[in-house]
Image: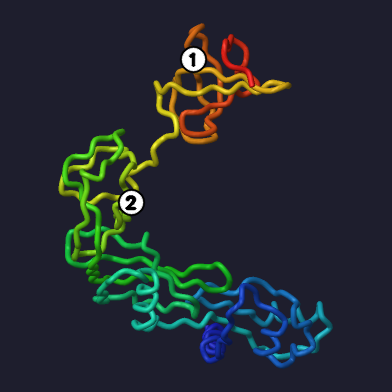
Amino acid sequence: MIAALATVAILTASDCHPIQTEKIHGRDLASALPAFAALPADAEFGYAPNPGQERIFRTGELRRIASAYHVDFRSEANACFTWPTSVPDREKLLAAMKTTLAGREAKIEIVEQSQNGAPQGEIVFPASGISQSLSDTALWHGYVKFAGERRFPIWARVRLIVREVRVKAIEDLRPGEPIAASQVRLETYEGPLTRDVTATALSDVIGMIPRNGIAANSYVQMALLSAPQDVQRGDSVQVVVPMANGRIETQGIAEAGGMRGTVITVRNTKSGKTFRARIEDRGKVVVVPAGAPGLAVEGKQS
């Protein structure tokens, strides 16, 4: 019992040496115990502890290292390493939030923040970390980037108010129908910051296709919009058939829609048979090699 208490006393009395790298090296052991000064500086002796924890090399382990590297080590000492931590400064949290919201007129008030010690590093508060809330405050999850790409989670409860121009629907916007200029307008918004990206210019939405219905008097969210397809199902399309000595052009009906580069099924207007073709431009497709059989074109050769 006395021996156990003595061991604890040794551990608690010894100072833990700060470390801010992924692994513990020879230079770190030498810094903690000068007897290991002869160790190769870059020799690795295990992973560093996580922030807030300790890594203790006890006497037996140290003697095995000393024996392997022909170091004269006769001490009963232990070597302790810890990752230095501290509660992040509120001003640094605020600066990171302002970086994320750069270009937006925002008022940020930190109401509360995590009090856990965090390692030194770059503080990041991504917009995706903002939790939606029915109250006047929101929980914003961020992290400290340290030791390369490692992340230590932090959070803050904030009151966020933004003032910006947003696009609002004047009338119900139907899914699948391009948005016309007469259906939307610009309006100044001042209120809580939302995580969803809202359109801020008419050019962002005019001609775009709502995936779902958007109610009148709603701000238009970019995630609900799709770019118009270059070819719609049922469109009459120009069909180009590459040939060894030129090409043939004819007309077909698109059996599916898509953007440039998409391979779709096209129906021959004369034979009724279908073939595969790649969308090259708006209203124009090029037959892919496997799509030629059944084409039976009677078109114009060039």
Q: Which residue is mark 1?
A: 267
The three-letter code of the residue at mark 1 reads: Arg
* Whole-percent x, y for residue 27 in the image: 71, 85
Q: Which residue is mark 2?
A: 203
* Total tally of numbered discs in the picture: 2
In percent of the image, x 66 and y 77: which residue is there?
Answer: 24
* Whole-percent x, y for residue 210 in the image: 30, 40
Residue 34 placement, left or right of 238: right
Q: Tell me which numbered mark, 1 or 2, is placed earlier along the sequence.
A: 2
Residue 141 placement, left or right of 181: right
Q: Is residue 18 above or below residue 118?
A: below
Within 10 Å of the Cα at label 2, are there few (<14), some (14-19), or many (20+) other Cα atoms?
few
| Closer to the camera in the image, 16 or 221 | 221
- Render colour scheme: rainbow
The three-letter code of the residue at mark 2 reads: Ser
The dot on residue 19 is none
| Closer to the camera in the image, 8 or 236 | 236
Residue 84 placement, left or right of 80: left
**SS category of the residue bearing label 2:** helix
In percent of the image, x 30 and y 56: which residue is there?
Answer: 201
Q: Is residue 286 above or below residue 259?
A: above
